[in-house]
Image: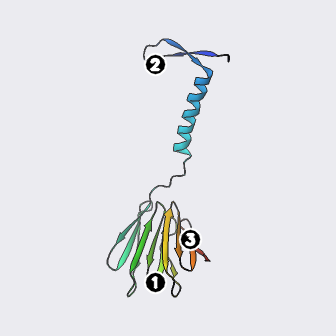
């Protein structure tokens, strides 16, 4: 049978001393540490970007900086998809891919290749990924850069 070390702790309701095992204390401190680490050390990205779709433009609002950025749509350009995460947003049109990040300072555009078909897109935190028939394309909302590889 394991040896129990008893520590007397005052009961907060009655004020009576109650025996507490060392294991119980360790478990309580471990639970508190996990709770604090989850709040303080979490990688959750604060929601910063919002998009407003209008007939001839897309307006991005950066709630952290208080800035607004207009993306003017060109002649015959149509928005096919929009993806918004906390720190990044991507707009897919029939002519290009356009991204904006919480720290990018404005819209960044990447032209579509001739005959390239849009397949899917996703975004999380400060990163976005676009998959087409020809390429896998990523956008960084931290520095506003596009990168891609062929499929």
Quarter the N terminus occupies:
top right
Q: Do residues under tags 1 and 3 come within 8 Å of each other at their CB atoms? A: no
Residue at (46% x, 60% y) in the render: 86
Residue receiving disc 3? 138
Provide residue 71's location: percent of width, then percent of height: 41, 77
Provide residue 150's location: percent of width, then percent of height: 61, 78
Q: Residues within 10 Å of mark 3 (few under 14, many from 20)?
A: many
Find numbered disc 3 in the image and state the secondary structure of the residue it sits on: strand
Provide residue 95's location: percent of width, then percent of height: 46, 84
Find numbered disc 2 in the image and state the secondary structure of the residue it sits on: loop
Q: Do residues under tags 2 and 1 come within 8 Å of each other at their CB atoms? A: no
Q: Which is more N-terminal, label 2 or label 3?
A: 2
Q: Residues within 10 Å of mark 1 (few under 14, many from 20)?
A: some
From the viewer's side, name the closer residue of 123 and 63: 123
Q: Which is more N-terminal, label 3 or label 1?
A: 1
Find numbered disc 1 in the image and state the secondary structure of the residue it sits on: loop
Q: Kindly report the distance in space between the C-alpha atoms of the residues bearing marks 1 and 3.
A: 17 Å
Dot label at residue 12: 2
Q: Kindly report the distance in space between the C-alpha atoms of the residues bearing marks 3 and 2.
A: 55 Å
Task: Choose mark 2 or mark 1, whichever is in front.
Answer: 1
Provide residue 13's location: percent of width, then percent of height: 42, 17
Q: Do residues under tags 3 and 2 come within 8 Å of each other at their CB atoms? A: no
């Amino acid at each position: 049978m394991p040896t129990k070390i008893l520590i007397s702790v005052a009961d907060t309701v009655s004020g009576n001393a109650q025996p507490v095992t060392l294991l119980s204390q360790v478990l309580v401190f471990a639970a508190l540490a996990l709770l604090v680490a989850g709040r303080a050390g979490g990688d959750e990205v604060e929601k910063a970007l919002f998009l407003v779709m209008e007939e001839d433009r897309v307006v991005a609002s950066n709630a952290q900086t208080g800035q607004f950025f207009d993306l003017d749509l060109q002649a015959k350009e149509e928005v096919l998809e929009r993806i918004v995460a906390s720190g990044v947003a991507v707009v897919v049109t029939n002519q290009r891919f356009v991204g904006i990040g919480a720290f990018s300072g404005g819209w960044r555009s990447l032209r579509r290749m001739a005959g390239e078909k849009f397949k899917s897109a996703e975004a999380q935190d400060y990163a976005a990924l676009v998959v087409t028939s020809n390429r896998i394309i990523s956008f960084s909302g931290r520095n506003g850069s596009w990168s891609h590889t062929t499929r």
